[in-house]
Amino acid sequence: MPQSDTRNRRVVLAARPHGMPTPQDFRLEESDVPTPGEGQVLLRTLYLSLDPYMRPMMNEVPPAYAAASVQVGQPMVGGTVNRVVSSRHPRFQVGDLVLGSSGWQDYSLSDGKELVPLGEMKQPSLALGVLGMPAFTAHVGLLDIGEPKPGETVVVAAATGAVGAVVGQIAKLKGARVVGIAGGADKCRYAVEELGFDVCLDRREPKLAERLAAACPRGIDVYFENVGGEVFEAVVPLLNHRARVPLCGTISSYNGDTPPPGPNRLPQVLAVLQQKRIRMQGLIILDHYGDRYDAFRRDMDAWVADGRVKLREDRVDGLENAPAALIRMLEGGNFGKLVVRVADV
């Protein structure tokens, strides 16, 4: 379904999901393309990023990092690559390529405050992946909190996802031994053969805890947490004294409406953290754009240009297919950075 010059398609939240979202929780609407006022620009969406944080944003109570959740009847949120198609703003000209946050719609208005000029890029979608927020999250979380040292063992969950894949590659650049955990043999093969991980374990195979222990004979010095659940339970007993745990996300619990069944393991986990002097620190990447973004871009631009860091792109065509793609990602079905191509560049 191609973009129109006069009509604005929007994917709005139709209902708050209970558990895993369904197609019925989204609705595709159309309205007139808005007109920019003084100091505004009209943006046309080219690419839309799909990311795990979108699921908590669908709940009535917003996550702690957001002022408000997505309201029913309003467009879903999301990072975007846009073209300026009309401008009444002195900083932006028609045709400019920018990084924005237009969400799940063809057109949006902006006062320019959150826009990042991109110049011309051969592959603009990279600004949503290996040169964008997921890689920035990996860079800050691993280097500022994880602080990997040569010879240490770094374990990363969701190892071929948009964040995990970059975490593993940076850890290798810093001289660490990297063990990934991913869902499926193909993903694990890719992590080792293409991304350079030392080992990658399929979380879907039985006896994960035993296999992880065998893969980490000297314990775990850094665990980059993206998943939670049984993966975290397998990691905790293997954490070394003064290990570091950057806490990026816990996607395994995002669809849960009730506490998980089984015994309460929190006392044992807290005991391990205290007795082994482990540092576990939460990470919200929005906190770091002011002081860390320039260093990230210097590093990542060089590493990508040299071929030392790469990120597979899982591309979906058509705004109308965004709901199914998000559901697939929450089920672990994506392979790399999930991006929706909304329109031609």
Image (cartoon, helix red, strand yellow):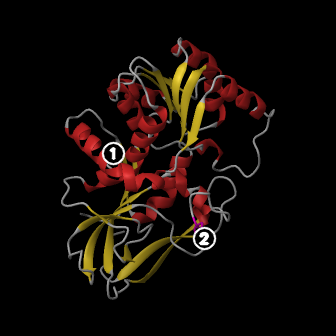
Given residues 71 and 217, the one toward you in this image is: 217
Label 2 vs label 1, nearer the camera: 1
Residue 126 shows in the view? yes
Residue 161 visible in the displayed image: no
The amino acid beneath tag 2 is Ala
For label 1, the SS is loop
Q: Which residue is mark 2?
A: 14
Q: Quadrant of the N terminus?
A: bottom left
Residue that badge 1 annotates: 130
Left or right of residue 86: residue 37: right
Q: Nearer the viewer, residue 328 or 201?
A: 201
Q: What secondary structure characterizes most of the magenta part?
A: loop
**Which label was assigned to residue 201?**
none
Q: Which residue: 56% across, 19% down? A: 212
Residue drawn at x 18%, y 59% as measured from the top left:
120
The x, y position of residue 78, in whole percent, is 45, 62
Q: Is residue 71 placed above or below 145 in the rendered structure?
A: below
